[in-house]
Amino acid sequence: MEARWRSSAKPVQAPKTTKTVSFEEVSGKASSSEALPLSLHLTNAVFFSLFFSVVYFLLSRWREKIRTSTPLHLVNLSEIVAIFAFIASFVYLLGFFGIDFVHSLILRPSTDLWNSEDEEENEALLRKEDARKIPCGQALDCSVTSAPIISAQKVVDEKPVKLTTEEDEEIIKAIVAGTTPSYSLESKLGDCKRAASIRREALGRITGKSLSGLPLDGFDYESILGQCCEMPIGYVQIPVGIAGPLLLNGKEYSVPMATTEGCLVASTNRGCKAIHLSGGASSVLLKDGMTRAPVVRFGTAKRAVDLKFYLEDPENFETLAVVFNRSSRFARLQGIKCVIAGKNLYLRFTCSTGDAMGMNMVSKGVQNVLDFLQTDFPDMDVIGISGNLCSDKKPAAVNWIEGRGKSVVCEAIIKGDVVRKVLKTSVESLVELNMLKNLTGSAMAGALGGFNAHASNIVSAVYIATGQDPAQNIESSHCITMMEAVNEGNDLHISVTMPSIEVGTVGGGTQLASQSACLNLLGVKGASQESPGANSRRLATIVAGAVLAGELSLMSALAAGQLVKSHMKYNRSSKDVSKTSS
Ligand code: ADP
């Protein structure tokens, strides 16, 4: 175990640039031919000939001795030389061809081993076995340890953590044994990268599974501490593509999209081109208010109604707004909508949250108000700060109708020429398809906010790239796409109306390096200096603009019957296109 740890802990110096690294390079092993003065084939031939010649010689000498009744242990010089040559060639051939086979025979655990009473010995043996035979999906690199291992295509600009110290080894053992909780590593060590590295090694030993494809190096683990992710063991790489320029409200945006779906970026890019050639799109923000809806219970429905009337009285609103707004200098209460269910009351608070997406902010404000109300309504039982009327990360009509976060409408007039030359279809076909697919088809399906072709594709990709909460793509993707022939039927008017775009440019994942770079590319990084909330509002309009481009392109592909063809081209026909879009 120790030996395995030490050898695996040898860090491999990462290449500075992206480069395909062979297994030998990665593992630091030289092939046997490199160690020999002769070529591999010639060396093998020499040892083969030597082995069979000495075997022949020794057997004939043995037969001779039996015939002449000479004792076997009496050997002359040529026999001694032959014995040495036999041992040397045997060792060489075994080392070259058979060592793995022999090891597998020697180290295979018998069924008795599993039943042995000496558990410690079993564990040691099994770990030794695991070190050699970890079941993993990768043909090349099946070693358990992760920290020093570099995937074949990886750019690393920092030194890999060396898990070499005895202290590290002790901690790993303690985690594997369950005496130290894995979650306490960051606070105990005060070094997030080392904590992740140790946790990962322990996980490898506990599960016996390889994590070699999941990178560890090249990430700032301090930046996620207490905010983005607990118990990290690495990070997943998602490629970021660029669509654009998207000409929106007279400004050009290059839209970053993090996705592994082939065609998506290319398609959105084509939509951006069509919009650009037609003079651009315009986008208007209708509403900006994050919501949180606690559920409270009373002894009677009458008392629940008392609170409802109290909250809906404009005179009380002023007081409640002051209490609510104490939660943050950016939180501004806009309204409280009350819904009764028997003696239970759901209070849907809406507030503006500056450049933050605002879930934390609104929750703090709601807590302030609930505490305040407890004085006048001591019989109010707060069941939960979230009673699902909010409604966060679940499909719900309340978001579709009332909106949540930013409500945006975005439109463009696409010239008939552009529809024909860039989108390879006609205005008429697009309008008809939109009517039958996005409107009628979705109505027949009983859609909730799903009157579009693939808004969630674009929303999710932009959300992941810019550090939004990807789970909020559920309501953020609510969208109705409308198409109409205008200018005597020559041009296409297209619009997307999206009532619940939940985005922020501060807080959460937006502060991480990669996500922050994508926000910077859009010119909406961090808090707006001119007017709090301007950055997040602009981001919402960009999301809607990108959705408009995506809708335009996919609908055109469908109208022109190109969808399967383009997926075959970009996805190398390895994918069921029906699952990906539309
Ligand atoms: P969320 O409410 O989206 O979860 P966080 O609470 O994580 O967001 O982040 C919001 C924090 O950022 C608050 O502490 C707030 O005071 C701070 N902040 C700084 N500048 C702004 C801004 N322009 N708009 C909103 N919040 C801001």
Image (cartoon, rainbow, N blue to C red):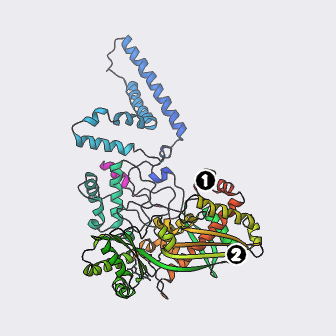
Residue named by callout 2: 413
Q: Residues within 10 Å of mark 1 (few under 14, many from 20)?
A: few
Up-down: is 359 above or below 207? Answer: below
Residue 189 visible to an observer of this rendering: yes
Residue 15 covered by magenta stretch:
yes
Q: Residue at x 38, y 78 (%)?
A: 361
Instruction: Check mark 2 vs ligand 1: CB closer than 8 Å? yes or no.
Output: no
* Residue 523 seen: no
Quote the CA–CA distance across marks 1 and 2: 29 Å
Tell me the kind of residue under disc 1. Answer: Ser
At x 25% / y 53%, what residue is drawn? 178
In-front residue for pair 313/250: 313
Q: Number of labelled discs?
A: 2
Vertical side of 378 occupied by 321: above or below: below
- Span colored in magenta: 1-18
* Percent of width and height locating residue 92: 43, 36
Residue 167 placement, left or right of 319: left
Identity of the residue drawn at 41% across and 83% down? 333
Comparing 7 with 463, the one in front is 463
- Residue, far front: 302
Quarter of the picture for ligand 1? bottom left
> Seen in the image, is 453 located left or right of residue 181?
right
Quarter of the figure with residue 409? bottom right
* Mark 2 residue type: Ile
- The residue tagged 1 is 578
Q: Is residue 42 part of the magenta span, yes or no?
A: no
Name the quadrant containing residue 329. bottom left
Residue appearing at x 33%, y 18% in the figure: 72
Q: Is 156 on the left-hand or right-hand side of 549?
A: left
User: Horizontal and vertical percent for residue 37?
Assistant: 50, 44
Quadrant for the C terminus, please: bottom right
